Image (cartoon, rainbow, N blue to C red):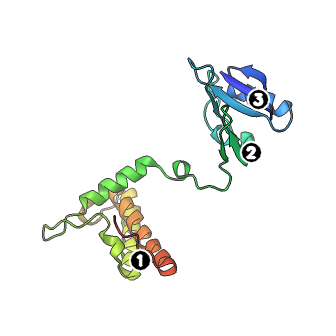
Amino acid sequence: MYVVQDGAGVEVARTEYLREAYKKADESGGGHRVFHQVEGFPEELVPVSRSMLNIKAAGKGEPFGADREGPLPAIRTATTGASRDGDVGKLSYAKGLSSQVLQRYLEYLGQHRTMKDGSLRDWDNWKRGMPVEWFAESLDRHVHDAIRASQGLPVPENAPLEDLLCAVIFNASGWLFELLVAKSGNREAAC
């Protein structure tokens, strides 16, 4: 169930569908907010921001489009009266990064910790610093290998495309890291 409240926290509408809740909020004028009422907890209202509207409407099977996007509130207020800053201007790691990609990338890093002599390097060994030329050369090589692999052409050691793309991420990240360290002086030493 979705609840629409005015700026004073007074309920002005209630509906089963998120699309309808936002329609009622828009028709009612500015300052209205939409909440999801958690089933079994009638006092628990979870705010639903317009940025969360890239989901399917309950029972409708229709994806929400960009027309439902809008500015987020500068301050979020819970039904208890507690408040905090809104999401405006804040980085969204959950939206900007993929947990699947990060997991696969870390698996790749874990597979490549063992050196040719059998020793095991630290996960953050690369943060100690390497010449950017090493990253640039390796990035160039892995990009070309990834393109060849995607075309079904042979690549060194028959490396899988996922590994090649992880190598691209590693070298691009390492190069970017060195550029940022040159500006900040911070090598993010491990704890």
Q: Amino acid at mark 1?
A: Ala
Q: Say which quadrant the C terminus sits in.
A: bottom left
- Residue 31 position within the rendered picture, expressed as x and y whole percent measured from the top left: 81, 38
Disc nearest the viewer among 3 and 1: 3
Q: Which mark is residue 184?
A: none
Q: Is residue 151 visible to the viewer in this orientation of the structure?
A: no
Q: Amino acid at mark 3?
A: Gln
Q: Mark 1 vs mark 2: which is more N-terminal? A: 2
Query: Which residue is identified by label 1?
Result: 136
Q: Is residue 181 left or right of residue 12?
A: left
- Residue 115 position within the rendered picture, expressed as x and y whole percent measured from the top left: 19, 68
Label 2 residue SS: loop
Query: Which residue is identified by label 2?
Result: 70
Q: Could you tell me which residue is drawn at 42 percent across and 51 percent down?
A: 101
Q: Mark 3 vs mark 1: which is more N-terminal? A: 3
Q: Nearer the viewer, residue 81 or 117?
A: 81
Q: Mark 3 vs mark 2: which is more N-terminal? A: 3
- Residue 79 position within the rendered picture, expressed as x and y whole percent measured from the top left: 67, 31
Q: Residue furthest left?
A: 117
Q: Nearer the viewer, residue 165 or 185?
A: 185
Q: Could you tell me which residue is drawn at 68 percent across and 28 percent down?
A: 18
Disc nearest the viewer among 3 and 2: 3
* Number of numbered callouts drawn: 3
Q: Amino acid at mark 2?
A: Gly
